[in-house]
Amino acid sequence: MHHFTAVIEKCTETGLLVGYVPGFPGAHSQAETMEELRENLQEVIEMLLEDGEPQLETEFVGTQDIALN
């Protein structure tokens, strides 16, 4: 079983959710709902894995809050 971390953002112009797997070229999609986005990303990743195991270019580490005065 594979596990990948997806980053999800909301496009301010279209209102769509945009998701991608950091460091995994081609592993990105968009959708109107979180459920639809998860399904889309799952489908894209499954298709990409048909070409073999990915060589991830980066690894997701985390997020940080940056506070400014």
Image: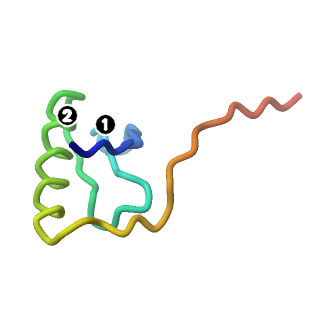
Q: Whole-percent x and y of residue 62? A: 58, 39
Q: Which quarter of the rendering shows the N terminus?
A: top left
Q: Whole-percent x and y of residue 46? A: 13, 54
Q: In the picture provided, is 5 more to the left or to the right than 45?
A: right
Q: Label 1, label 2: how many angstroms apart (C-alpha)?
A: 8 Å
Q: Which quarter of the rendering shows the C terminus?
A: top right
Earlier-in-chain disc, 1 versus 2: 1
Q: Which tag is nearer the camera, tag 1 or tag 2?
A: 2
Q: Quadrant of residue 24?
A: bottom left
In the image, farthest residue toward the right: 69
Q: Determine which of the numbered discs, if any, sits on residue 36 in the image.
A: none
Q: In the picture provided, is 65 more to the left or to the right than 23?
A: right
Identify residue for label 1. Answer: 15
Q: Residue at x 69, y 31 (%)?
A: 65
On screen, 67 above or below 51?
above
On screen, 20 above or below 24?
above
In the image, farthest residue toward the front: 1
Q: Whole-percent x and y of residue 50? A: 10, 65
Q: Quadrant of residue 33?
A: top left
Q: Residue at x 20, y 36 (%)?
A: 38
SS under mark 1? loop
Q: Residue at x 30, y 42 (%)?
A: 3
- Crowding around mark 1 (Cα neighbors within 10 Å: few <14, some 14 to 19, many 20+) is few
On screen, 33 above or below 11?
above
From the viewer's side, name the closer residue of 34 and 32: 34
From the viewer's side, name the closer residue of 27 and 18: 27
**Are circles 1 and 2 on residues that touch, CB within 8 Å?**
yes
Q: Please, what is the three-letter code of the amino acid marked with disc 2?
A: Glu
Q: Please, what is the three-letter code of the amino acid marked with disc 1?
A: Gly
Identify residue for label 2. Answer: 32
SS under mark 2? loop
